[in-house]
Amino acid sequence: MEISKGVPSGWRFFPALLLLVFCAGQAFAGGKGMTLKIMVEQEVTVTNEKGEKETRRVAANKIVPGDEVIYTIHYLNSSSAPAKGVFITIPVAEHTRYRNESARGADTEITFSVDGGKHFAAPDHLAVPVGNGRQRPATAADYTHIKWKFNAPVPPGASGAVSYRAVLE
């Protein structure tokens, strides 16, 4: 589904994920702004043409419980203005468990939610209820959502990616 003109061909957009991206200011005005493409991959070891083993990422078409997958969200500012106040929020995929300290995103502040995306904080500030009004520190297995808040405006035409790893349960 094409979201806006000028987006490279081959980019597939996921409307549910697109709703999770919020931009303030001119980048969102007039229906223009950030566009996304999500990829689900896994790393495999292959032997290259020189007979050397190397690790490559391939589409995660056949995964079984215990396999690690990599979720990469590619973004593009398809507008003619800098995108200000940009953040990307994505739920941890169903039937997966976030792999601790695996979220990546250059020039972003990464926070997590343990309550379905209502509140976000750094890992050391998250807790989950255990009953009787008590709480315990949250672990990576408790994360329900991840948020990347961009520290600077995204220039027109600029693109990049954020990512995280999870294990299939």
Image: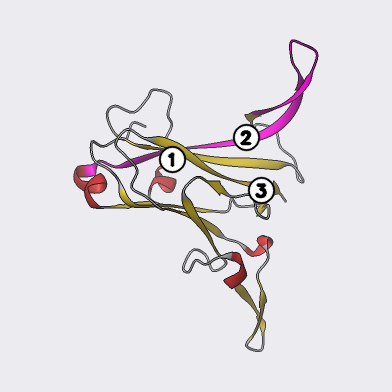
**Disc 1 packing (10 Å; few <14; some 14–19; many ≥20):** some
Whether residue 147 is visible to the viewer of this picture, yes or no, is no
Residue 64 figure quarter: top right
Q: In which quarter of the image is residue 59?
A: top right
Which of the pair 127/157 is nearer the observer?
157
Marks 2 and 3 in Cβ contact (< 8 Å): no
In the image, what residue occupies the spot 55% across and 44% down? 163
Local secondary structure at mark 3 = strand
Residue 98 vertical position relative to residue 53 in the rendered view, above or below: below
Position of residue 120 relative to residue 26, above or below, is below
The image shows residue 38 at horizontal and vertical percentages of 50, 38
Residues under numbered marks 1 and 2 in contact, where contact means CB atoms less than 8 Å apart: no
Magenta span includes 134: no
**In the image as oriented, which residue stretches furthest toward the bottom?**
132
What secondary structure is the magenta-colored segment mainly? Answer: strand
Q: Identify the residue position indicated by label 2 in the image.
A: 41
Q: Can residue 81 be seen in this view?
A: yes
Q: How far apart are marks 1 and 2 (CA)?
A: 16 Å
Residue 13 x, y percent position in the rendering? 41, 36
Residue that label 1 marks = 14
Of the residues under marks 1 and 2, which one precedes in the sequence?
A: 1
In what element is the residue under mark 1? loop
What segment carries the magenta color? 31-57
Could you say where residue 97 lies in the image, as x and y percent from the top left? 67, 54
> Which marked residue is nearer to the observer: mark 1 or mark 2?
2
Marks counted in the figure total 3
Going by the numbered disc 1, the residue's amino acid type is Phe
Q: Does the magenta stretch include residue 51?
A: yes
For numbered disc 2, what is the local secondary structure? Answer: strand
